[in-house]
Amino acid sequence: MSAVLELTVELCRRASLTPDDAGCQALVAARLAEAGFAIESLRYGEVDNLWATHGSGAPVVVLLGHTDVVPTGPLEQWTTPPFEPLVRDGCLYGRGAADMKGSVAAMTLALAAFVRAYPRHRGTVALMLTSDEEGDARDGVKRVLETFAARGQRIDYCVVGEPSSRESLGDVVRVGRRGSLHGHLVVHGVQGHVAFPHLVRNPVHLAAPALAELGAARWDDGDACFPPTSFQISNLRAGTGALNVTPADLEVDFNFRFNPMSGQQALRERVEAILARHRLDYTLEWDCSGEPYYTKPGVLLDAITGAVRDVLGYEPVPDTGGGTSDGRFVAKTGAEVVELGPVNATIHKLDEHVRVADLERLVQVHTRVLERLVG
């Protein structure tokens, strides 16, 4: 068993459901301490965060990951138990194998290998881990960066280990992400008997034209870097459970994945204008969990493109798709942020898995990135 596979297996055995780290960061910290890294644990509330550094001064190169995982879903539907990792047909199966304990293991071993080869490297290399990426993300990287701001700790380049690849390792790297804007809409009506429609105000009927208009709207056209902004309804709730009673309220959860062409304020105003035009009685709460960001071609992207080419023999395609990641918090500090990780086809699914060969090559890619930046 290779070193990266062994470490990934040990991490996947730990049922680290958000925000429980379940000892993952201690395992990583021990490996890096042996390699000469300074270790700092930052715990906020129920969330564990790890900051491991080697060297000093600028530039500061951070490899960023998370040790928490999403719930397993029905255990009986897994081919093998999700927290009993198993290699089968060249793949490691287990919850978190791809998202993102495989990346955490690869980044850990790459950092250790790099400082052994370059004990007097330029600047600072670091690993930042959190156990709150899959959850509310309030006491994880966001909180750590607030601490860093207070003490003057900067980050110049950040490689996020999220599973960015589409078909093969390194074929896609994320150079940005869309923003995420959530809305919780409650349309108010008057409950009553279905046989007396003149005495009720059915909020489902009242809201339907407005929801149809929202679903059909074109919010922007995107650009060369970002796809168009998208609107999706995720939940609808109404009714008492009785077949002969109209509901008093309709609850609607929806989400925008938006690009820089449509700021969150403009989206809010357009939604509220549509609701007003349909004369709805409603309440609406907004929550923006992340603004869009984009890393232009520069030092970091050049290093990653070159590293993928050196190790894998092809150049990655820059992309801004997918959901949100902790990179959004780092990008706000002015750092260059790029995401590079395993194939994402099975993340959050039953029988999540990662190719063992990809883990081994990922160590080489991360090591080469570090060499190009501060070797």
Image (tube, rainbow, N blue to C red):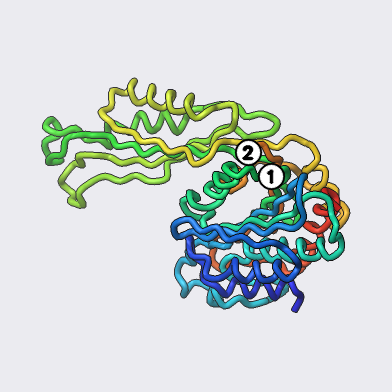
Q: Where is residue 274 in the image (x, y as percent from the top left)?
A: 38, 24
Q: Can residue 300 be seen in this view?
A: yes
Q: In this view, does 373 lie to the left or right of 347?
A: right
Q: Is 228 located above or below residue 80 in the figure?
A: above
Horizontal relation, residue 69 to residue 253: left or right: right
Q: Position of residue 365 (x, y in %)?
A: 80, 57
**Residue 347 in view (yes/no):** no
| Residue picked out by circle 1 | 155
What secondary structure is found at the residue carrying circle 2? Answer: loop
Front residue of 28/271: it is: 28
157 vs 49: above or below: above
Q: Name the residue under label 2.
A: 333
Which residue is found at the position 53% from the left and 76% from the top? 81
The answer to which quarter of the image holds residue 283 is: top left
Q: How many labels does the image show?
A: 2
Check disc 2: other Cα within 10 Å, few if <14, some if 14-19, many if 20+: few
- Which residue is rendered at x = 57% and y = 42% of the image? 150
Residue at the (53%, 60%) spot, across then down = 48
**CB of mark 2 within 8 Å of CB of mark 1?**
yes
Q: Residue 195: where, in percent of width, then height?
A: 12, 39
Out of 103 and 71, give the one closest to the viewer.
103
Amino acid identity at mark 1: Ile
Q: In which quarter of the image is the N terminus?
A: bottom right
Label 1 Cα neighbours within 10 Å, binned few <14 / some 14-19 / many ≥20: many
